[in-house]
Image: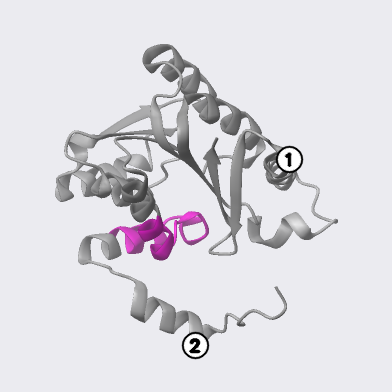
Amino acid sequence: MADQTAATHDLLAYVREVSLRDDDLLRELRETTADLPGGTAMQVMAEEGQLLALLVGLTGARAVLEIGTFTGYSTLCMARALPADGVLVSCDIDDRWPAIGADFWKRDGVDSRVDLRIGDAAVTLDALLEERGPESFDLVFIDADKTNYVRYYEASLTLLRAGGLIVVDNTLFFGRVADPAATDPETAGVRALNRLLHRDPRVELSLLVMADGITLVRKR
């Protein structure tokens, strides 16, 4: 790790210049989100949204599960990458912020692919298992309350097909996972999931040092 290229501001700006494929609608949603309380911290960065879309295409996903919608930026990116008859089930505790994204999904013509579920995500996941059965999703994106990360992971693994992919956001959690003084429940929740993933024989994994930490988990 010490021998890797240092991620300077100028280098990151160059990476964005030569790799990010952006458009007006995505920029508008990011700007709208940035104006909200805590919006910048909670916003999926543009490069991560592009990565999620790429992963949907690489896995050939037709059914995607998203745990944590917020203003629906990642939802928009992934829904665009789905085939016309694909479905993205997105879960959030409240409809206040997803309502912002819903307008952008409609404007982009992908709203028919998005199935928004409002309520406690754990309850929603149980309902999806009853409704769709196990191994019914190709890709899962987890980006919700960190205290329940282990619970969301276990439910997602049951819902995911063999060979499918789970993408977990914020697995470095602003660097607090490496700070012994950080003992808050959310940091503890991320640490617990990271430890579980490291020793879980059911999956293969790679933690990307990108954004706030993105862990890719492939179900064996």
Depth check, front residue: 182 or 125: 125
Question: 10 Å neighbourhood of mark 2: few (<14), some, or many (≥20)?
Answer: few
Q: Relative to 220, say whether 188 is above or below.
A: below
Q: Relative to 131, say whether 213 is above or below.
A: below
Dot placed on the residue nearer the N-terminal end, 1 or 2: 2
Evaluate whether residue 35 shows in this view: no
Amino acid carrying mark 1 in the image: Arg
Depth check, front residue: 90 or 97: 90
Q: Which residues are magenta?
A: 29-51
124 inside magenta stretch: no
- Secondary structure of the residue carrying tag 2 is helix
Amino acid carrying mark 2 in the image: Asp
**Label 2, on which residue?**
10
- List x then y, in percent, for residue 173: 64, 55
Q: What residue appears at the point 37 percent right and 50 percent down from the top-left corner?
A: 74
Tell me which secondary structure the magenta stretch mostly adopts.
Answer: helix
- List x then y, in percent, for residue 121: 50, 27
Q: Is residue 65 left or right of residue 148?
A: left
Depth check, front residue: 113 or 167: 167
Quadrant into which the C terminus falls: top right
**Label 1, on which residue?**
199
Dots 1 and 2: beta carbons under 8 Å?
no
- List x then y, in percent, for residue 160: 46, 30
Marks 1/2: CA distance?
Answer: 37 Å
Q: Residue furthest bottom?
A: 10
Quadrant into which the N terminus falls: bottom right
Q: Relative to 130, say whether 92 is above or below.
A: below
